[in-house]
Image: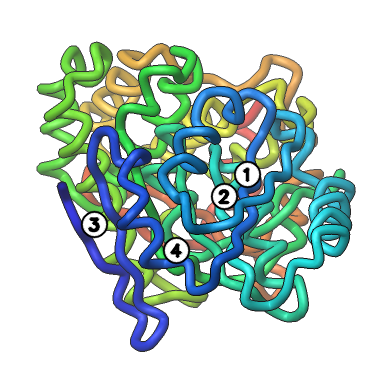
């Protein structure tokens, strides 16, 4: 087992990474302080893993809330539905919520946990690659608004994160590829050696080699934990984790949530960011080509939808959370392993990039 710690003083918490971790209820029970918990999951994950968790916790009464699968359900209606269910179950401030699923379930459950009676404990059990390497760690919780992704939410940390790598065996290939976008992101922004390792181990990752997956997931969580410990509320360094997301969120909002997977939109966004870095004279052409080649190797899109140009992108990006003092900040790679936050993409450059 790999065990990491997100170091946030008294709010520090562990990340456990191991195949078949879901059946080890004794470890999970250590993070449930009363004899009552509520499992929040979706209708795809529920029949696969809920019973394993419930059976592994015989001394804890577990109620269950199941919502429909998909990004289009990450909204205030689902938030209110979960709150209503909790009230009907007589859940209390000391009831532990268990988020079992991908990024939608983790983000939604975390926001409910932050809000219900002003805060209740929750545990993340991510079952998709994207949620294992990114969204389950760091305490960003939110739901979407029709005008923008993750516009309504809170910073609220879980008590623990349990990553069972075997859950990836039931993940559709398209979802696995989407998760790889976030994996590649860490190499581009922070760790050149990891990017090179990904180039060398593409086949092993696609075939879901156990050791390769364990290493990749652990390295991503390690980088994220390091960044979150330094900048929990995204006032500086943590913004780098949004590489590809400014363009990507615009794609998701314009195309309709769920039509482009989050990771697919981020992949196209990362290519745009790399090309912007090249246009600024920061990133070498050869490095941009390596970024494109690695993204393509995992069957991810390298161009945005053909019906989106400068005007459409800007219409969505003005709502981006990285707008400060009326200026939109972009995360742009300067080289593989190094990125910066900058407002210095002028209209001419953006029109050449996006049209």
What's the CA distance linking mark 1 and mark 3?
22 Å
Structural distance between the alpha carbons of marks 3 and 2: 21 Å
Q: Which residue is mark 3?
A: 222
At label 2, counting other C-alpha atoms closer than 10 Å, the crowd grade (few under 14, some 14-19, many 20 or more) is many
Helix, strand, or loop for circle 1?
helix
Disc 4: which residue: 138
Neighbour tally class for label 3: few under 14, some 14-19, many 20 plus, Cα within 10 Å: some
Give whichever of discs 3 and 2 has the lower sequence position.
2
* Residue projecting furthest to the bottom: 10
Work out whether mark 1 precedes mark 3 in sequence or the reverse, and give the earlier one: 1
Give SS at disc 4. Answer: loop
Q: Quarter holding the C terminus?
A: top right
Q: Considering depth in this image, is 24 or 17 the residue closer to the camera?
A: 24
**Disc sitting over residue 99 in the figure:** 2
Q: Nearer the viewer, mark 1 or mark 3?
A: 1
Does the residue at mark 2 contact the one at mark 1 (Cβ under 8 Å)? yes
Q: 310 and 330: which one is in front?
A: 330
Quarter of image, res 300: top left
- Image: 104 above or below 110: above
Residue 105 disc label: 1
Pointer 2 or 1: first along the chain? 2
**First in sequence: mark 1 or mark 4?**
1
Q: Mark 3: which secondary structure?
A: helix
Do callouts 1 and 4 mark residues in contact (Cβ within 8 Å)?
no
């Amino acid at each position: 087992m790999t065990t990491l710690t997100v170091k946030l003083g008294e709010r520090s918490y562990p990340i456990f990474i191991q195949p078949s971790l879901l059946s080890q209820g004794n470890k999970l029970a250590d993070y449930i302080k009363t004899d009552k918990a509520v499992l929040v999951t979706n209708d795809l994950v529920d029949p696969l893993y809920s019973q394993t968790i419930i059976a592994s916790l015989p001394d804890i009464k577990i109620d269950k809330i199941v919502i429909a699968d998909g990004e289009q359900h990450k909204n205030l209606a689902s938030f209110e539905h979960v709150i209503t269910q909790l009230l009907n179950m007589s859940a209390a401030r000391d009831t532990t919520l268990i988020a079992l699923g991908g990024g939608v379930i983790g983000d939604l459950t975390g926001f409910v946990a932050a809000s219900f009676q002003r805060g209740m404990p929750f545990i993340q059990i991510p079952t998709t690659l994207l949620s294992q390497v990114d969204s389950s760690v760091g305490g960003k919780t939110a739901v979407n608004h029709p005008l923008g992704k993750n516009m309504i939410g809170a910073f609220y940390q879980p008590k623990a994160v349990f990553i069972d790598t075997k859950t990836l065996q039931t993940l559709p290939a398209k979802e696995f590829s989407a998760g790889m976008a976030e994996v590649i992101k860490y190499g581009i922004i922070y760790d050149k050696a990891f990017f090179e390792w990904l180039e060398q181990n593409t086949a092993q990752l696609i075939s879901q080699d156990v050791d390769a997956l364990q290493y990749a997931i652990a390295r991503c969580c390690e980088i994220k934990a390091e960044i979150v410990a330094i900048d929990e509320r995204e006032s500086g360094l943590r913004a780098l984790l949004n590489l590809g997301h400014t363009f990507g969120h615009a794609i998701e909002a314009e195309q309709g949530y769920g039509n482009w997977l989050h990771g697919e939109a981020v992949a196209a966004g990362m290519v745009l960011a790399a090309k912007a870095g090249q246009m600024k004279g920061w990133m070498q052409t050869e490095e941009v080509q390596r970024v494109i080649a690695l993204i393509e190797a995992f069957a991810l899109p390298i161009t945005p939808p053909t019906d989106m140009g400068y005007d459409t992108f800007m219409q969505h990006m003005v709502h981006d959370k990285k707008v400060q003092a009326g200026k939109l900040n972009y995360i742009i790679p300067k080289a593989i392993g190094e990125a910066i936050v900058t407002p210095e993409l002028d209209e001419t450059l953006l029109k050449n990039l996006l049209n």
